[in-house]
Amino acid sequence: MANWHGKSRGTVLGLRIYVWIIKTFGLYASYFVLLFVAAYFIVFSFSSTKSTYYLFRRRLNYSAISAALNVYRSYFTFGRIQLDRVAISAGLKEKYTFEFDGIQNIKNLLKQKKGGILLTAHMGNFNLARHFFDNEHNPAVVNLVMTDFEHQQIKNYLESVTGKSTLKTIVLKDDLSHIFKMNEALKRNELLVFAADRYLKGSKTYIQEFMRKEVQFPQGPFKLAQRNNIPVLFVHIMREKNFHYHFYARPAQENANSGKELLKLYLQNLEEMLRKYPQQWYNYYDYWNDFKSKNNGR
């Protein structure tokens, strides 16, 4: 996997413009503006465009024309879920419907009193998780485990618009203090959420085939679950037609005797979701080292 720097796409100015459009003209007008923004990124974010094209062309085996069209659809969808995040939190929640597919799996997990690990990825819109848990009156306490590379200005501005999330966060630190916080959360029967499809430079990784090519994945979440016998769910929140969001929570059905075996189960689930929602994969960089492979004649 190519080096990922942990930074989120976007600027405070862009977010301010979208919030102003939503408040002034409504949500549909903001979607209309997004049609042109997506086209802008096609041209002026060439490395991301190239990487996304290779996703559709080489990993999903789309035709050249279909791959090019789906790059645009991917940018548009990414922008749309960002707008949805702001709109839902800013008082337009009634425009959307929410389906919690797997609520019983979470309840069953909590009954074990071991805490739990929810493995997700950089796809869909997991930022909406609090709305699902709030709607279902679920007793689960959720901790998002994340890096601290996200632009602080964007984070602060979003909180000023949408309010602070009810989800808790545990930030990965160089001094490993996050390990203590994660263990304490599990002792309180809380849930830890990891986006396990990326790793940071310097972290320990597994190498595993995903979509017909080997990729590196972080060892941490998988080893933590397996060594401590912590129950695991694979979770995703995906946008569907007619302003509908679908929350998936699926248990790791088979017994995994190692972290790498658990990773294989995770990737089986991830590939299924990627093929079902191909425009909602948001790793906008050379994820499979396709460019390097091409340069080497492979």
Image (cartoon, helix red, strand yellow):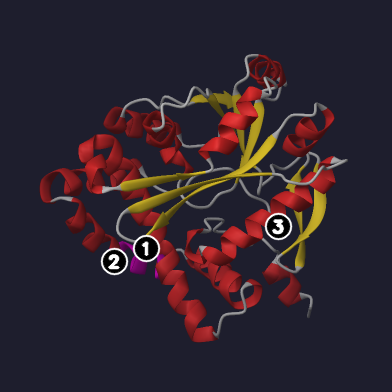
Task: Say which of 203 and 112 sits in front.
Answer: 112
Q: Name the amino acid, label 2.
A: Leu
Task: Say which of 104 and 271 sits in front.
Answer: 104
CB under 8 Å between callouts 1 and 2? yes
CB under 8 Å between callouts 2 and 3? no
User: Is 294 contained in the magenta span?
Assistant: no
- Left or right: 104 in relation to 37: right
Give the CA distance from mark 2 to mark 3: 33 Å
The residue that mark 1 highlights is: 76
The residue that mark 3 highlights is: 268
Image point (30%, 32%), residue name:
162
Q: Name the amino acid, label 3.
A: Gln
Q: Name the amino acid, label 1.
A: Phe
Direction left: furthest residue: 24
Residue 171 visible somewhere in the drawing:
no
Q: Is residue 9 above or below residue 223?
A: below
Image point (68%, 70%), residue name:
291
Magenta region: 35-43
Q: Is residue 111 above or below residue 84?
A: above
Pick the quarter of the image with the N terminus.
Answer: bottom right
Q: Position of residue 10 (x, y in %)?
A: 40, 48
